[in-house]
Amino acid sequence: MLQGYEGSCHCGRIRFRVRADLADLLECNCSVCTKKGILHLIVPPEDFELVQGGEDLATYQFNTNTARHTFCRHCGMHPFYVPRSDPDKISVNARCLDGVDPAALRPTKFFDGRNWEAAQAARRAAESR
Ligand SMILES: [Zn+2]
């Protein structure tokens, strides 16, 4: 069920609102997601609003430079970013939502980001079925 949430980085400079369904929670095993510990909620831009802190965002890019791994330049948290798999969407880090019990965050989807091209092809094939 789509619900409205607010979230932030650790220091609170960056705040956002999102409409998302926690049942769509996705985990990815790529090198950067593994080290970040991010749990993804991938939403269309109309369901995401940056409330404050745009000037506090820094961006890390690597490999194809498609993804924009944004993070707070002060506290280092990664509350959301633009994913390579869906560059027209926003991936919110469910761990940065306010008032959500981390124990209740159970990923239902898995993206094999260590085998990125094969995983993306499989995902596209499943979506077009
Ligand atoms: Zn911060």
Image (tube, rainbow, N blue to C red):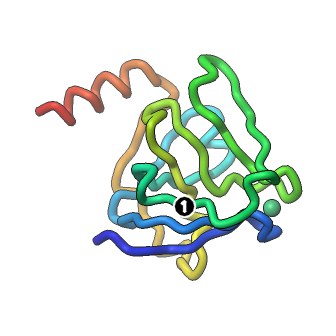
In the image, is residue 67 above or below residue 26?
above
In the image, is residue 85 above or below residue 4?
above
Q: Is mark 1 within 8 Å of ligand 1?
A: no
Q: Can you tell which quarter of the image residue 22 is in?
A: bottom left
Give left or right: position of 12 versus 82: right
Which residue is nearer to you in this view: 16 or 61? 16
Disc 1: which residue: 49
Res. 42 in view: no
On the image, the x and y values in percent for residue 122 come to 28, 27
The picture quadrant for ligand 1 comes to bottom right
Res. 52 in view: yes
Which residue lies at the image location 42% right of the left edge and 19% below the top edge? 117
**Quarter of the picture holding the N terminus:** bottom left
How many numbered marks, from 0 up?
A: 1
Q: Can you tell which quarter of the image residue 58 is in?
A: top right
On the image, the x and y values in percent for residue 43 come to 42, 52
On the image, the x and y values in percent for residue 14 come to 73, 63
On the image, the x and y values in percent for residue 6 come to 56, 73
Which residue lies at the image location 51% right of the left edge and 30% below the top edge? 84
Which residue lies at the image location 32% right of the left edge and 69% below the top edge? 2
In the image, is residue 10 above or below residue 56?
below
Which residue is nearer to you in this view: 89 or 119? 89
**Element type where label 1 sits in the image:** strand
Q: Mark 1: which amino acid?
A: Glu
Give left or right: position of 97 versus 20: right
Report crowding for label 1: few under 14, some 14 to 19, many 20 or more residues within 10 A (C-alpha): few
Task: Give the farthest residue toward the right.
Answer: 74
Q: Can you tell which quarter of the image residue 66 is in?
A: top right
Task: Give the farthest residue toward the bottom.
Answer: 99
Give left or right: position of 127 versus 39: left
Which residue lies at the image location 39% right of the left edge and 44% below the top edge? 110
Task: Give the farthest residue toward the left.
Answer: 129
